[in-house]
Image (tube, rainbow, N blue to C red):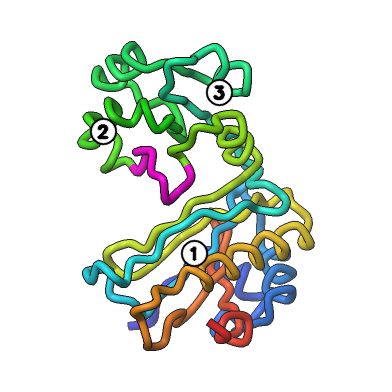
Amino acid sequence: MPVKHSKRYNSAAKAADLTKEYPLNEAVEILAKFPKAKFDETIELSFRLGVDPAQGDQMVRGTTPLPNGSGKKVRVIVFTDDADKALAAGADHAGLAELMTKINAGWLDFDVAIATTEAMKQVRTLARVLGPKGLMPNPKSGTVTDDIPAGIKAVKAGRVEFKVDKTANIGVGVGKRSFTTAQISENVAAVLEAIGKAKPAAFKGHYIKSVTLSSSMSPGVKLASTEFNKF
C-alpha cells in the first residue's frame, strides 16, 4: 500500500527530490523553499550514528557555540550562594536552598541550569528531578562552573548541548526559519564539526551514518556524506 503524505510534504517534494542527498549549502537552499508554518520554526540537524550507546566508552556528548546563535530565548537559573552576582550577569533566577525547594515542589520553568562547584554538593540531590528532564548541571556540558558570568553568557548566546540517545541518534537545534541561509549553513557546519570531534576514541566503525536537515513542520533534506565522512 503506497505511503500517503501530507499536503505540506507533497508541496515540499516539488522543491526537491527528497530521496537524494545534497551538499550543505544546497540542502539549506532547498529547505528555504519549503512551505513555512505560521510560527518561526526551529531548524534541526538529525544524526544517525554507528556507536552503541549501551557501551560506556561509546557515549557521544558535548556542547558547541552556534556562530549565529540559536534564535531562542534561553531561560537560565543558577545555583549559587551569590544570587545577586548571577542575576546581574543575566540569570533569570538564582539562589540555592529556596530555588531547590521550589524545584522539588514541581517548578521547572527554565531551559538551562548552571551551578557553582560548591553548590553542586547540594544540587546533586535534585538528580532524580532534573536528570530525566536533561536539566541537571554537568561539568561535561559546561554548566558546572565557578565563572558564572561566562557560563550565562555562553548559554544565552546560543551554545547548544548534544547527547546521543538510546537508539544512537542525536537531534540538535541549529537556528530558526527566519535566519538567512548563510547563518543556517554556518551553524550547521559548527555542529557537524563538534559532533565529529566528539567521536569516542574507543569506536572504530562507521561513525556518522546519516545527517538530515529539517524544520519543525518540514520533511528532512539528507546531507551528502561528503559533508561528514571525514569523521
Query: What segment is highlighted magenta in the picture?
Result: 134-142
Which three-letter amino acid code belongs to the residue tagged 2? Arg
By secondary structure, the bulk of the magenta-drawn segment is best described as loop
Disc 2 packing (10 Å; few <14; some 14–19; many ≥20) = few
Look at the numbered disc 1 and give the secondary structure of its residue.
loop
Q: Which mark is residue 6?
A: 1
Across and down, in percent, residue 134 comes to 35, 44
Q: Is residue 38 visible?
A: no
Q: Which mark is residue 124?
A: 2
* Residue 220 x/y as whole percent: 54, 69
Depth check, front residue: 146 or 3: 146
- Which of label 2 and label 1 is nearer to you? 2
- Which part of the image, by quadrant, shows the N terminus? bottom left
Q: Hey, which quadrant is residue 43 in on the image?
A: bottom right
The residue located at (44%, 82%) in the rendering is 209
Which of the two labelled residues, at mark 1 and mark 3, occupies the earlier sequence position?
A: 1
Inspect this view and state whether residue 49 appears.
yes
In this rendering, the label closer to the viewer, 1 or 3: 3
Q: Which mark is residue 88?
A: none
| Quarter of the view holding residue 12 | bottom right
Numbered badge on residue 91: 3
Spatial CA distance of label 2 from label 1 is: 46 Å
Q: Is residue 87 above or below residue 223?
A: above
Percent position of residue 111, x then y: 46, 35
Amino acid type of disc 1? Ser
Nearer to us: label 2 or label 3? 2
